Every structure is written in C-alpha cells, then in structure tokens.
C-alpha cells in the first residue's frame, strides 16, 4: 500500500494514490518486515506475483511486457550468507538452462528501468557485481534476453526498511528473480512450438 504521508516530488503533479503497481516481488517482503528484528541469523522467503513496469523505448513485442509474472527468492543474513545462496541459485539455474538445451550466458548487469538520473547507481551495480543476469539468446531478434536476475542488495534495503538482527550483527539481503513469460518465450524462440522433446523434470 502506498504511504500517503510521504512527501515526494511526484506528489506535486499527481493525485495521492491509495495503491500503486509493484515493479518487483521483493519490495513486499521488505515492507512486511519493516521496523522488525529477525530472530535467526539467516532467513529465506519466496513469493510470486504480477509485476508492472514501463521501460520507455525498451518496450517491444513480447520481449518486454508491461505486466509479467515473476517468482523471487528473498534472503537475509550475513554478506557470506547472501553471496552463498545467490551463488547456489545461479548454479542451479545454469543446470536448468543446460537441461533445456538453451543458448545462454550469465553477465554482470544493471536495471534497465533506471532513469538517467540513476547513472551512478547503474555504475555501482556493474562494477560491484551486485546484479547478475541470466540471458538467453533470441534467434529471430539476434539479441540476448534476460530471464532471471541474481542480486546482492548489500545493506541498502535493510537499512532503508530498518530491518535488523536481534543480536545486532550486521544484516545484508539479496534476491533471485525468475521471469516466467520471458523464459517460456525464449524456449519457444530457440526450440519452436514443438516442445515434447524437452524434459522439464
């Protein structure tokens, strides 16, 4: 739910909304844990929802939908904990893509929906390797398409939402997100509509 009491620049030009469309899944988890203290040194959550984004000139055919389904795994703990689970999800997804016989790659990236004013944030993400994307080749477009992302938020979001550990140890967070429609689109793009030969189990 949107906090009407927040005084933002956008409020000068728009009505105060009661609700807004969510651009991702993990923000709900952070909002749920806001101003709380975690009992365990490591916590992991998962959720799935419809996300909505308008990415300006990046919007084109089925590659970038304005509304799409995303599954996320959100994890909290020490920096080692966060990096460990992130690496586990990367390795698991690599095996999954190999099993589907998809041409893919894993690259350091930044969020494409950042505006130009967030250029410094984009540079930070790429140089610190805090965001890794799984990209699948789309033959007819002759370009790569991101189907999953693996993110280390460091302590930025837990500080923003005032989430701490009861033992006062330093807390970090991360998330792994999978785009359902993009993954299915990439499978059909590489293998065609006849998918019987693919073993999903």
Image: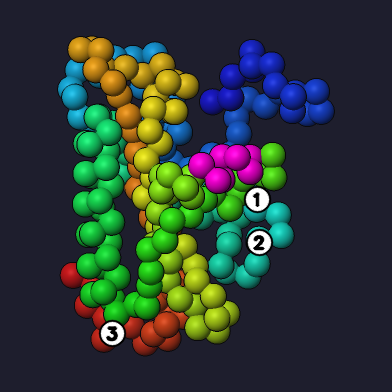
Tell me, yes or no, whether the highlighted magenta stretch contains residue 169. no
Region rendered in magenta? 118-124
Name the residue carrying label 1: 54
**Sequence order check: which comes first, mark 2 or mark 1?**
1
Q: Which mark is residue 99?
A: none
**Relative horizontal placement of residue 9, taking residue 39 as reference (left or right):** right
**Sequence order check: which comes first, mark 2 or mark 3?**
2
Residue 183 found in image quarter: bottom left
Name the residue carrying label 3: 196
**62 w.r.t. 84: above or below:** below
Name the residue carrying label 2: 59
Residue 45: in sight, yes or no?
no
| Principal secondary structure, stretch drawn in magenta | helix
* Residue 166 coordinates in the image, percent (x, y): 23, 12
Mark 1 falls on what kind of element?
A: loop
* Residue 4 coordinates in the image, percent (x, y): 64, 17
Q: Residue at x 50, y 83 (%)?
A: 139
């Amino acid at each position: 739910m949107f906090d009407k009491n927040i005084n933002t620049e956008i409020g000068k030009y728009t009505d105060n909304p009661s609700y807004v469309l969510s651009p991702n899944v993990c923000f709900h988890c952070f909002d749920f844990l806001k101003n709380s203290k975690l009992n365990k040194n490591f916590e992991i959550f998962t959720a799935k929802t419809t996300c909505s984004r308008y990415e300006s000139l990046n919007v084109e055919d089925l590659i970038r939908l304005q509304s799409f389904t995303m599954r996320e795994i959100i994890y909290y703990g020490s920096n080692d904990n966060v990096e460990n689970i992130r690496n586990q999800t990367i390795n698991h997804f690599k095996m999954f893509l190999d099993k589907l016989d998809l041409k893919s790659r894993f690259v350091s990236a930044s969020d494409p929906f950042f505006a130009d004013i967030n250029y410094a944030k984009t540079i930070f993400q790429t140089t610190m390797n805090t965001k890794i994307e799984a990209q699948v080749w789309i033959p007819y477009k002759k370009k790569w398409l991101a189907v999953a992302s693996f993110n280390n938020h460091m302590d930025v979001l837990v500080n923003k939402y005032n989430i701490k550990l009861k033992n006062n140890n330093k807390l970090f967070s991360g998330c792994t997100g999978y785009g359902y429609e993009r993954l299915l689109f990439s499978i059909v793009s590489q293998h065609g509509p006849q998918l019987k030969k693919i073993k999903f189990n």
